[in-house]
Amino acid sequence: MKLEGKLEGKVVLVTGASRGLGEALMETFARKGARVVGVSRNADEMEAVASRLRARGYEAHALAADVGDKEAIHPLVGAASALVGPIDVLVHNASTLGPTPLPLLLDTACEDLGQVLEVNLVGPFRLTKAIAGAMVLRGGGVVVHVTSDAAVSAYPRWGAYGVSKVALEHLGRIWAAELEGTGVRFLNVDPGEMDTVMHRDAIPEADPATLARPRDVAARLVALVESVDAHPSGARVEAARVEVGRPEAA
């Protein structure tokens, strides 16, 4: 399945889509003509995002689910497929920091580490496993792992989150190696530091003026999906290095 310049009519599932980068991705994919499904634990927030997009003439759907809950994965995939059919693009954007203020590893409860891994690593594994088989049968698809510079730099107090992102990136590389030649492509995308609620929770003293806008990052990430064949499957790409045209006016 070639996606270059052809997101029109494709089905895109974005997790963690009720705010921040996820919400921006919903809008950006929709503007490209994709049929978008957003997933969030907060049903009201997610429906509000989808409703705003539908009011502008886009096809957008909202599903409430916790990707860290094993029992939620297959019902989520079933509901999405019933709404829009097979998934062409899967974006693993949902993520959690764990407790804030961020603790040192010595002060991190085992249960908190486990919960971060369930949401940031095991959940994406389960969701990809539930969707990628159908992609293989159809001969193509794109799976995006939204990662972080915490996966390559050892920041004090970012232990649980950083470990989860290291593992998520390597998961993407292993998926890519195992599914080489099937047409299913994987990307690990580092969005950089953004002006989001998550960033404020982690670094409340940060100056928002120094941070990227989620909408700008979303434009770069969608451009990566459109040109996915330009990168080796499983590659790590920094969104800040991607050049895109001027975003359309809202």
Image (spheres, rainbow, N blue to C red):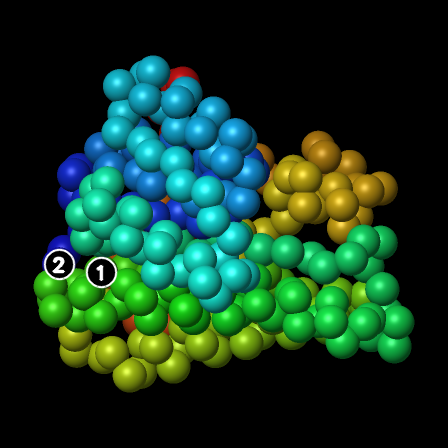
Front one among 141 and 189 = 141
Mark 1 lies on residue: 141
Q: Is residue 58 visible?
A: yes
Residue at 32% across, 76% down = 176
Structural crowding at the residue carrying mark 2, measured as other residues with C-alpha within 10 Å and reported as few (<14), some (14–19) or many (≥20): some
Secondary structure, mark 1, is strand
Tag shown at residue 35: none
Amino acid at pointer 2: Met
Residue 12 pos. (x, y %): 29, 46
Residue at 40% across, 60% down = 73
Compared across the picture, whether 131 is left or right of 22 comes to left
Q: Is residue 153 visible?
A: no
Residue at 72% across, 35% down = 208
Front one among 84 and 218 = 84
Number of marks in picture? 2
Residue 137 pos. (x, y %): 12, 69
Q: Quadrant of residue 172?
A: bottom left
Amino acid at pointer 1: Gly
Front one among 230 and 88 = 88
- For marks 2 and 1, the one nearer the N-term is 2
Identify whether 32 is placed above or below 79. Answer: above
Residue 185 pos. (x, y %): 27, 67
- In the rendered image, the quadrant that contains the C terminus is top left
Front one among 151 and 127 = 127
Compared across the picture, whether 130 is left or right of 210 comes to left
Tag shown at residue 1: 2
Residue at 35% across, 61% down = 74
Find out whether the residues at labels 2 and 1 contact each other: C-beta distance under 8 Å: yes
